Image (cartoon, rainbow, N blue to C red):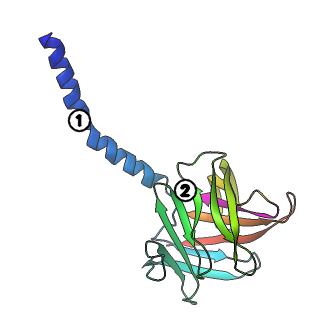
């Protein structure tokens, strides 16, 4: 009986000693699968699909409105054009350049095909008009944009209605492509990542 007790005690000791390393590994795993923009890179983007180019670099934490926990990437020429993002264990969130644009969870963690969640949306006259259901359509797309070819891209449909928006996110890079789908077969680019610079 004493021998069994010693074995159990030894097992508990080893388990408790390994626990902090397991916790660190879990945190490292979350960081490894980040879909937040890389703060050390400059992003060159086409926001209309028709040559409206912005060059955005990381400029620190946002300090206005109720977005104070968001990080900011600002256009190098037009300071009033910026992107806001934050990442938590629950997902990746985007905020807009304008006060009427809601904070949106654009990716829900953990990433899983067919996962659904809801976001508030506004209609054309900026009044609140309900919720959109976001769905992860695929977790392993290969997508080619002007910035390069990305594998294991996450594809998200941003509404269950037609028309709808489809967004694509690459690990360690963030949003690489956004398409407006007028019908299931007719779509156009509304955002494309053109280049990533150091």
> The N terminus is located in which quarter?
top left
Seen in the picture, residue 63 relative to 159 is either above or below; the reply is below
Q: Earlier in the sequence, mark 2 or mark 1?
A: 1
Q: Quadrant of residue 15?
A: top left
Label 1 element class: helix
- CA gap between label 2 and label 1 equals 33 Å
Q: Nearer the viewer, residue 100 or 39?
A: 100
Question: Where does label 2 land, which residue?
Answer: 171
In the drawing, does residue 190 fall left or right of residue 23? right
Magenta segment, which residues?
162-171
Seen in the picture, residue 2 relative to 160 is either above or below; the reply is above
Q: Position of residue 148 (x, y in %)?
A: 65, 63
Q: Quadrant of residue 127?
A: bottom right
Q: Is residue 25 visible?
A: yes
Numbered disc in front, either 2 or 1: 1
In the drawing, does residue 137 fall left or right of residue 26? right
Q: Residue at x 66, y 58 (%)?
A: 149
Question: Where does label 1 land, which residue?
Answer: 16
Q: Residue at x 44, y 51 (%)?
A: 30
Question: How many numbered tags mark residues here?
Answer: 2
Q: Position of residue 155 (x, y in %)?
A: 67, 55
Label 2 element class: loop
Find out whether the residues at labels 2 and 1 contact each other: C-beta distance under 8 Å. no
């Amino acid at each position: 009986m004493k021998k069994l007790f010693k074995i159990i005690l030894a097992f508990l000791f080893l388990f408790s000693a390994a626990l902090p390393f397991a916790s660190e590994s879990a945190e490292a795993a979350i960081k490894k699968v980040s879909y937040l923009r890389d703060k050390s890179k400059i992003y060159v983007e086409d926001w209309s699909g028709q040559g409206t180019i912005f060059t955005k670099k990381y400029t620190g934490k946002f300090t206005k409105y109720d977005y104070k926990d968001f990080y900011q990437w600002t256009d190098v020429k037009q300071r009033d054009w910026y992107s806001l993002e934050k990442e938590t264990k629950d997902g990746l969130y985007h905020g807009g350049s304008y006060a009427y644009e809601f904070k949106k969870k654009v990716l829900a963690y953990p990433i899983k095909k067919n996962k659904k969640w809801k976001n508030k949306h506004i209609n054309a006259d900026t009044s609140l008009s309900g919720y959109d259901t976001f769905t992860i359509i695929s977790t392993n797309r290969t997508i080619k944009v002007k910035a390069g070819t990305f594998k294991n891209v996450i594809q998200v449909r941003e509404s269950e209605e037609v028309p709808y928006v489809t967004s694509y996110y690459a690990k360690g890079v963030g949003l690489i492509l956004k398409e407006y789908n007028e019908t299931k077969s007719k779509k156009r680019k509304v955002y494309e990542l053109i280049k990533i610079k150091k």
